[in-house]
Amino acid sequence: MAQEVFVIEFPLKVEKWQADILDKRYEHLRRIYNYAQGKLVRQYTYLTQMNEYRKYGFSKEHEKMLTKKGNDKALKAIKNIKEYFFGNHPFHISGICDKAGEPLDITFSSRGIPGFLEKIASCNIGADTTYIDLGINSLILGMLGNQLWAAWDRMINDPETRRVSFKKYGELNSFATRVKVTRGKKYSSGMNIHLDTMTLDIKINGKTGKNAKFISLPIVYNLKHAEYEMSALHGGMESIKVVKVLRRLVRGQYKYYLQLTIEGEKPQKGRQLGKGTVGIDIGPTTIAVAGENIVSIDKLAAECDSYQKEINKLARKIDRSRRANNPQNFNEDGTIKRGVRLVWKKRKDMKRYSELLNELAELKRRQAAVRKASHISRANALLKQGDTFIVEDNPYKGWAVKKKETKTDEKTGKYKSKKRYGKSIGDHAPAMFVTILENKVKSLGGNMKIVNTHNAASQFDFTDGSFTDHGYERVITLSNGDTHQRDLLAAFNLRHLKSGTEETKQYDMEAMRQHYDRFCELENEEMARYRLGIKKDDQSTIGARKLFAPRK
């Protein structure tokens, strides 16, 4: 049985001269990444234009259709053909040679791309110096290569991925290394952790032994959480799998952190799961829960709304500043000029514009931190409600995609908006909440079921066993005349989905009849809470303001 893997993070105490060394390393790695990316884009374009490849007639649209139909057999066959083609068509880059001095065979594979990066680092970058001489070793490059290969693996095999991206200046903010095993001992080549003194040593040159140079960074740990952090490290270096150093922009300045990936038993904080099954219906902004002792509906990460208003206000201010500094790049009607080469004023020459960008980055960082904290707090509260959680596998990405069809309003004749829930999903991150809850439930030995949306939980009426499409209705009337909030009813239905039949729309109707009275009682209490708390000018977080008819 595979052991549990978890991550623990510590701040690092970094002096100014040490920060300069780390920042240079991030920039060096970004250059290596972008150089390799440029060469790979060119070779990928060449390979996909070969007649040998084109004869298969691969297309993203066809693969998307197969994915939609669930034709895994055809998709697997396509993936195998692509692996064979790219694996058997190696290419060469001028100046990149193997140990024998021959041109290195490079392939689009999990070994070929990381190996390509290692060879780039050994090339001369001036003054008889290589990246390896600056302390960037093969283990660090191997982790960066895995990141690059992951991007190309998606590009080749994922129908939704259309392109790969390059790293802009300041965008690459981490480097990592695996802990290496040599002669039965574990050590991290290039980054050594001393748990007795709580320091991290990072090598800054390519030499070994007495000639090796290191910078020593104290690891800061919070006394409030010291017991948890120390218990996570009780296995010593034997339990550490990956060492990562990352930086974040906090209040306009970079802060540095040590992130350790640890294999072993995750320390617990005294939390325990309850008993019973809990159904959860998640929308773009809301979460509805139905269990034995809980029926609730709330807005996900509602605390982020105030941040979003400030972010929108600041974004408009940034746009005005950008236009004022570059008037030559805009037409009279405010649209950006097309068909001409645009020259933009550099950020360093626009002091106020640069300050606004830093303010925006700080607001987004704080919003992300509040969002994550809110999700963790909500997940911890739900753990007490049951030991089995059932959630629909909602297409969050699909919700965010704009509609392709252009429609007009019959009354006004104006074009209808193609926008869907992109901003809402970005602000409230429902997928992140599901991941957090799943990790917590599984670490405590519970069961998390993510079931197919084909079960149509919001359409099922257990009183007569029928399925009805309710469109955009937020209040649903059952065949017995009772009315319910749509999301709460969906959560109640999910709770009673028969085990082992999650794909066949089979619900335990006998159990639903037994639990129905209790559900109605808890739902009435929940709706009364909302009626008391909602203001007239407030946007309802449940999508329905009308009072629910009492049960007959």
Image (tube, rainbow, N blue to C red):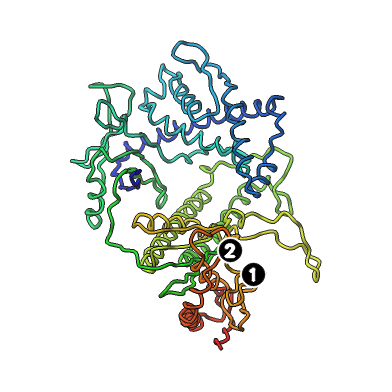
Label 2, secondary structure: give it: loop
Q: Quick one: 498 or 24, which is closer to the camera?
A: 498
Q: Quick one: 327 or 482, which is closer to the camera?
A: 482
The kind of residue tagged 2 is Lys
**164 left or right, relative to 116:** right
**123 left or right, relative to 332:** left
Locate the N terminus and report the quarter of the image it occupies: top left
The answer to whether mark 1 and mark 2 are in CB contact below 8 A is yes
The residue depicted at 62 percent of the width and 31 percent of the height is 81
**6 left or right, relative to 153:** left
Q: Quick one: 254 or 102, which is closer to the camera?
A: 102
Residue 282: image location, x then y, percent: 52, 64
Q: Tell me if residue 182 comes above or below residue 301 in the rendering.
A: above
The residue depicted at 50 percent of the width and 53 percent of the height is 356
Locate the C terminus and report the quarter of the image it occupies: bottom right
Residue 467 numbered mark, or none: 1
Is residue 79 visible in the rendered structure shown here? yes
Q: Quick one: 21 or 239, which is closer to the camera?
A: 239
In the rendered image, which residue does mark 2 sit on? 505
The kind of residue tagged 1 is Phe
Residue 123: image location, x then y, percent: 46, 19
Residue 169: image location, x then y, percent: 50, 38
Q: Earlier in the sequence, mark 1 or mark 2?
A: 1
